[in-house]
Image (spheres, rainbow, N blue to C red):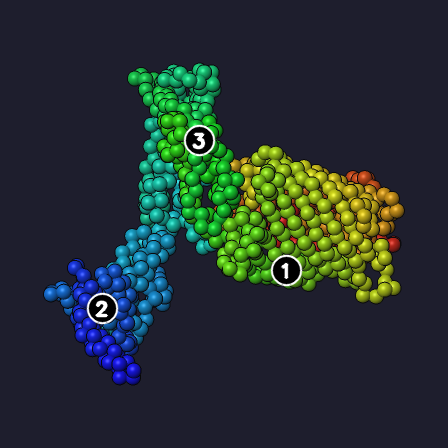
Amino acid sequence: MFIMRNKVILRFTVLALIQAPIALTAKATETVKEGYTIVESITITTEGENSINKHPLPKLKTKSGALFSQADFDEDLRNLSKDYDRVEPKVDFSNGKTTISLLLVAKPCIRKICITGNEAVPNHKILKTLQIYENSVFDREKFLKNFDELRVYYLKRGYFESNLCYDLDHNEHQGYIDITVRVQEGSCGRIKTFKINGLSKSEKADVQEIILTKQHSKTTSWFTGSGLYHPDIVEQDALAITNYLHNLGYADATVTPRREVDECGNIVLYMDVEKGPLYTLGHVHIEGFDVLPRRLVEKQLSAGPNDIYCPENIWDGAQKIKNTYAKYGYINTNVDITFSPHASRSVYDITYQVSEGSPYKVGLIKITGNTHTKHDVILHESSLFPGDTFNKLKLEDTEQRLRNTGYFQSVSVYTARSQLDPLDNAEEYRDIFVEVKETTTGNLGLFLGFSSLDNLFGGIELSESNFDLLGFRHLFSKGFKCLRGGGEYLFLKANFGDKVTDYTLKWTKPHFLNTPWILGVELDKSINRALSKDYSVETYGGNVSTTYILNQQLKYGIYYRGTQTSLHKKKKDQEGPDIAANKGFVSAAGVNLNFDSINNPRNPTTGVRSGINFEVSGLGGTYHFTKLSVNSSIYRKLTRKGVLKIKGEAQFLKPFGNTTIEGIPISERFFLGGETTVRGYKPFIIGPKFSPTEPQGGLSSLLLTEEFQYPLINQPSVSAFVFLDAGFIGLKEYTIRLKDLCSSAGFGLRFDVMNNVPVMLGFGWPFRPTEMFDGEKIDVSQRFFFALGGVF
């Protein structure tokens, strides 16, 4: 039995040895398929290496004995070009084999740098811009890029005639390079005098607002960079002045720039204007419309017979006609304008030719590019829905609303012929394509600041404007990326100050449960030592709110808030608020109505922002009171740049039940005074007091503010303002005593720093800098103020 088993094994072994060469041959035959070659050898030769630029031979993805891959070889060449100054590949294909030879010329060492012709810009500035230094490795691509930046730098300095060139003496064998930079600076383009001839005083003022060329100023040009001559910008400004005059009716106006140089080398720039005759409009006709009534179409015109010739108004009428047709589904309507001048008079006849096209309805809505943001978040911003009559204005509104979310780097909303055609009516439908490109929506920042209220303060904040709370379910399987894309807002902040320390968490969910309602939740804790150095007010709690948007300007909401409040004194026997009255729980619910028609949320110049809020505290809890707040801010442009801002706010608190006036906690009372309310007074000092330095707060409050702001510099944003503030705080319910108003006046500056953080500083002079307290005269003024943010 043993012998038989050995025989079987022997026969199997012999069979395996016989079959092995056949298998190997078959495998080799399968590897080298038709059109493929094997890399036989790779020869690498380096040149120009020395002790400074020498480095080990590179590792290639293309290897000897493996199949040749053009994609891998291209990637190897790209990587080599990053490490070497020049790469020369040679590839030979023959008999199913590939032979590769690579000549690698090392990046040279900079032996010498010579700069000639420069006078205004020192050598060290040029070297810093070019980022080249002797005995360092020369990077050709980086040098060319930086050389272009040096050219731009000279142009920004006003050297519009500057000419820069370079020579590179590269010794490839020894591995060094000599660099020569030649500069011809030319004259400096500082505009000493800038005059516009041929315009009235008011027209010159208008023109100064629309042109970029300015006269050089010793006080501001160093900061703004203006006052330098740039030929391209001057030509652009001449065209802008021409368009301005055309819109005033001077259709034949011409503007000719003229440049002179004074004895000091400064530029004297003139804009010579020839207005020509003033043109008016003769007949204004509209042709080609059948669908819409004549009265509706003619109502869209911005210019009529005998009006001043204004191309802007004429073309504006054409756009309004197109927009009117777009509301009824005619998205392809076209309006051409024919201008017919009179031979003997300065008159133009205008003819609008309307091509109506066909009406369309909305087909499918297709979304692409949203790698994180959910489809329903994008659809919530759409003003159009499948089956609606197509409205081009709503299409543009959808794109703008998506841009305003801040979720996307780019947004494109367009139409195409419908692909879904169940009723064979494709010509009547247009699909909407929404293409987006995601951007970062999270922000983590540290901040440090100073104010006249809190002295030194700092903290940390975290925000995510495209948060997804339900993503926590997949946190361990998908990572933190699952917390994005829900269209929610999350904000966490910890602020540590000398007088105020607070912690905040906010979460907001728009379109809650696919409804127009906005759900908000907020948790906060605060330790306030700003009212007195002898005690601190501590609060913690939260609120839940829902807001319904009625239209673009009007919204209302309801909310519930719960706050635990307490007061801690350094010494229990000190005068001031009662500790027992200030320890309890506030349980309140309220409603609010808000109106907002301002044109810009950050820097409004026109519009109204108003609100009314009423709440009742007593849904359980310790305290029983009602609170009413009414506020309104009005913005109006008084001059071309200047903005008048008027603000009024009245607040009233009324206790009921077993809660008395003395029983209202400090944390719920009203306070005025300081940089964010009545400037020129100490923080919170207005109204009744426990001591000369400790405000008592009130149950009735009135704040009135009037401010005129005028921008000084656009980039960066710097504005000056003058103001008049007034405020009242009283302990009587629903009582305002105008004769006890504390008023102040002053001026200041408002500017942006870092990432659009508004800063305000200035001086205020109170009309009542002192007052009597227990027969003693006390000072309540604080003339200098400095703060982040502001009154408006």
Badge 2 is on which residue?
A: 66
Residue appearing at x 64%, y 40% in the figure: 547
Give the percent coordinates (x, y) of residue 321.
43, 24
Give the percent coordinates (x, y) of residue 539.
74, 56
The 10 Å Cα crowd at callout 3, few under 14, some 14 to 19, many 20 or more, is many
Please determine whether, in this image, residue 392 is positioned above or below residue 356: below
Give the percent coordinates (x, y) of residue 211.
41, 41
Residue appearing at x 20%, y 64% in the figure: 30
280 lies left or right of 614: left
Badge 1 is on which residue?
A: 494
Q: Quadrant of the C terminus?
A: top right
Identify which amino acid the numbered label 2 is placed on: Ala
- Secondary structure beneath dot 2 equals loop
Identify which amino acid the numbered label 1 is placed on: Ala
Residue appearing at x 59%, y 42% in the figure: 513
Q: Nearer the viewer, residue 483 or 40?
A: 40
Q: Quadrant of residue 601?
A: top right
Please determine whether, in this image, residue 227 is positioned above or below residue 358: below
The 10 Å Cα crowd at callout 1, few under 14, some 14 to 19, many 20 or more, is some
- Measure the C-alpha gap from mark 1 to mark 2: 59 Å
Could you tell me if residue 373 is visible in this image?
yes
Please determine whether, in this image, residue 92 is positioned above or below residue 337: below
Badge 3 is on which residue?
A: 362
